[in-house]
Image (cartoon, helix red, strand yellow):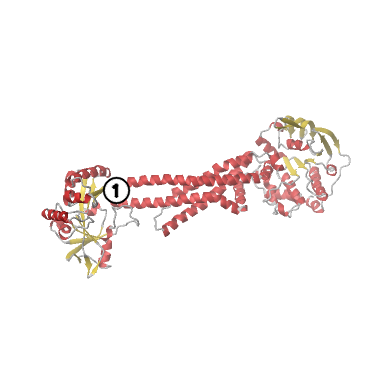
Amino acid sequence: MGILDAIQTGLSELLSHKMRSMLTMLGVIFGVAAVIAMVSIGEGAKQEALDQIKQMGIDVIHIKRASITGELADKAAERSPFGLKYSDAQSIASVCGFAKRVVPTREVFADVKVGEKPVSVKIVGTTPDYLAVSRSSLLEGRFLRDTDIHGHVRVCVLGAAAKRELFGFDDPMDKMVKANKRLFRVVGLMKAKEIGSAKAFSAMRDLNSDIYIPINVAITDFKIASQQAIPGDLTQLQKIVIKMLSKQSLENSALSEVIVQVQSDTATGPTASVARSILNRSHRGIRDYEIIIPAELLKQSQQTQRIFNIVMAAIASISLLVGGIGIMNIMLATVTQRTREIGVRRCVGATRWDIVRQFMLEALVITCVGGLIGVVAGIGGAKAISDFAGWRTVVSMQAVIVAFSVSALVGIVFGMYPAVRAAMVDPIEALRYA
Amino acid sequence: MALIEVRDLKKTYKIGSVEIPALRGVSFKVEPGEFVAIMGPSGSGKSTLMNLIGCLDRPTAGKYILDGTDASKLSDAARAEVRNRKIGFVFQSFNLLPRMSAIKNTMLPMMYSTGRRDAKAARRALESVGLAHRFHHTPMQLSGGEQQRVAVARALVNDPPVIFGDEPTGNLDSATGVEIMAIFQRLNAEGKTVIIVTHEPDIAQHAKRILRFRDGILESDEPVLEQLIAAPKPRDAAACP
């Protein structure tokens, strides 16, 4: 008997018991659909994380100001009253040989208005190197220059969202932006940056609503935006204020973040440890900073993905196993029910192998049809999840192929025993079977 | 040369430690073109003999030569091929596949020989048994006589030299039974060797030779002196020139 004949027989057998076939396939359908949908979610999350990490760049490390609260807050206020400060950036730049660029940034509190309308933008003081380190690019005009820093010039560069907020569709070049009653001349415009819907890492924020100004202007004109707790104890507070006032200088000016770009991708680890030891000394053991290495985050996310995949595979194999047992059960019942048919076929010349092949193919047809329905349901499920839950899902062709092949394999494995049972039927007995 | 030669054929069934002899040594020959009826009461060994010469079972001892080859020593797959090419079976209970149409049932042996579905050959076979108008009916939609005709067509489709009928009229009324015997007689006249097992003396009278069995041995082997000639149905007569 030809393969096509056997497949046709299998299909007509399936169609003649629609309800039973459907129920038999259900295990495989659910298994395959679950695998595809879940892998799509995992893949989506992975892509999201990857995009964000790539946006940060894998040849950089971020050192961020962190606020200390609770028991250590008082000690921190005494030992390291300024937190992450300008001199930290300077010492990292001078000590660490791997560092190619060291960019300090200072996010500040500022009241930015267009006319009388306040807008939600963020003013960030930084240096000209920021453009290269942040992987941003200019749409128009220029970025900050060294001469802006040295000359203490009040100029600004607008992020795409900030421009929209402030000027709408007008041309902002050479116009003035008012922040805390000071005027900043717009000299450049940034290209819009793509940013994922869900923020996988705290290190990421939407850079599009930033307005960049020279770092020293940010230090002199504005207070830093920080969540640092103010000590409740008045005398303590007094001490800090006195200390701050007495030592107020560029070196002690608080920074929000220091971005260090290294010579090569592999140097992020060593650079981070050098930076950590510098900061540990200058902050006298107070961990009021956080070092983020995107390359490590990438590794971590890949690790997580691997674990997720293993869990997925386990869940999938269990559901496919259950589906396979269901198929074996039905096939065994079918073999008993069709004993007479087997006898007739054997009598007119079917060999045992013909019978094995016929029943194997029938099981295979069940699982493959189930697998196909499962693939469609899985892709539909992934689509539904991204539509309703707003998660990013990526249907991976690999997952579809693997899930479908496994369902076919289930058909072969679990169809084997019933098929062999069918072939072992004695034709004489089978023909007598009522 | 004899088409079928059976020499001292023995078959013993083992049930637990008890041995039950079903055939105790049987010898006979059937020449090409013969029409043989095998008779005997139940337990006489006629069904066992049928299974052995139909290559469905293997003898415990003795020789069975079918069309020049020793069929008693063939492997399972080789016996399947013999059943497919050299033997056409017709059973008491028709044994058609219920979900297949008449023509698909007729094509079944071809699926295990050439693998091709030669619809033309199947149509020819169905026409020769007078079922030209029933190609696409399922067994459920056919009468008993029509079902048995489909079974005969299935037996013929691979053009085997021998047709075996195991109580082929057992489930039919006597008139329909005679119609089937008419088809067998016509096939025999066209050169096929026909062997039927029956316990109805009337049916056996349609053959040319009767083998009688009792207690696992061949009791008598006689030619039929007054062969009954079954009149074919007018429609069948028209179908075969």
Chain letter for the residue marked with disc 1 in the picture: A
Q: Residue at label 1?
A: A294
Q: Does A277 appear above or below A140?
A: above
Q: Does A15 appear above or below A358?
A: below
At label 1, counting other C-alpha atoms closer than 10 Å, the crowd grade (few under 14, some 14-19, many 20 or more) is: many
Q: Residue furthest left?
A: A246
Q: Is residue B136 left or right of residue A33?
A: right
Between residues B220 and A138, which one lies in front from this camera angle? B220
Residue B33 visible in this rendered orientation of the protein: yes
Rendering coords of residue A100 (x, y %): 21, 47
Q: Residue furthest right?
A: B226
Q: Residue at x 54, y 51 (%)?
A: A26
Amino acid, disc 1: Pro
Between residues A283 and A154, which one lies in front from this camera angle? A283
**The residue tagged with tag 1: helix, strand or loop?**
helix
Rendering coords of residue A174 (x, y %): 19, 65
Between residues A266 and A105, which one lies in front from this camera angle? A105
Q: Residue at x 69, y 54 (%)?
A: B136
Rendering coords of residue B127 (x, y %): 74, 51
Rendering coords of residue A398 (x, y %): 44, 48
